[in-house]
Image: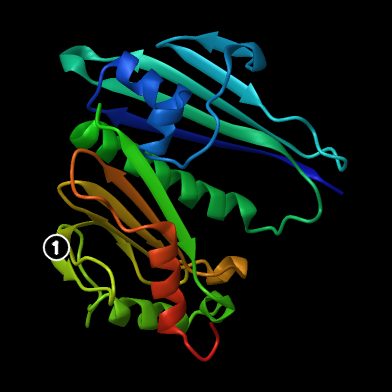
Amino acid sequence: MGRKFELRKEVELAATPQQVWDAISTGPGLEGWFMSQPAPEEGACEIWQPGEHLSITTPAGPDGSFHAFEYLIEARDGGSTVLRFVHSGFLSDDWGAEFEGLTARGWDMYLHTLALYLRHFAGRPAVYITAEGPEATAKPEAWPVLLRGLGLDHNPALGERVHLTPEGLPAIDGEVDWFEGEDSPFLAVRTEDALYRFHGRAPLGMTIAVGHHFYYPAEQPATNEAWRVWLHGLYPEQG
């Protein structure tokens, strides 16, 4: 039997309500912190109040499952904005019991990335690049291999400056803005012109993934295929 769920998040952002609206409701904005996807359209949204309120519900699947996303934007003194976000819906039996916890963590990461995007890169055109590793990376022991492939010989600390050297790709000089090394490992690094996200997804039975938000103007970034080749090269016997 399926079940309802609801996740609530709140984040204060160093941006105006209009900047937050552009980030959540336009294609270029979404590419800057989330992923490449079609932007919501006014006629397809339950609520469309620019700079204030956006509500979207996906069509229900054959099993009755659906997702609803609501964004409430509120200006604060000093030029900042509070974004209140609700992800709710109905899940079929196919989803594991850990879905809500993993989704909550995922939204924490995305909203953190949104905050960095608005603070450091707002208004700069963005390109989102992503790649997934081979099946071998769907195991917990794959994560240390990834770190070694980046040139790390330790678990980096939040705020630490790092020099990552993925073979065949440009070196990455930046600051760690998020790190988790336990059951659901995650490494995030911010540079002058990019946000890099390395996801360990073994708890979901999924492969390691790389997400790379690149902001122009700067040199041409690595491509999706270059990241894929690098990931598969770390696990040659399984790639």
Q: Residue 34, percent across and down?
A: 43, 41
Q: Is residue 15 toward the left or the right of residue 91 in the image?
A: left
Q: Is residue 51 above or below residue 89?
A: above
Give the percent coordinates (x, y) of residue 4. Answer: 73, 39
Q: Position of residue 220 (x, y in %)?
A: 25, 50
Q: At x 23% / y 78%, what residue is drawn?
A: 152
Tell me how many marks there are.
Answer: 1
Determine if residue 199 is in view: no
- Residue at x-position 86% and y-position 43%: 63
Residue 227 percent coordinates (x, y): 39, 65
Residue under numbered circle 1: 160
Q: Nearer the viewer, residue 91 or 166?
A: 166
- Relative height, residue 110 to residue 78 (above, below): below
Up-down relation of residue 109 to residue 75 (above or below)? below
Residue type (three-letter) at the residue carrying disc 1: Glu
* The quarter of the displayed image where residue 223 is located: bottom left
Label 1 SS: loop
Viewer-proximal residue among 184 and 46? 46
Q: Judge from the rendering whether residue 176 lies leftward or rightward of residue 204; answer left or right.
A: left
Nearer-the-camera pick, 21 or 217: 217
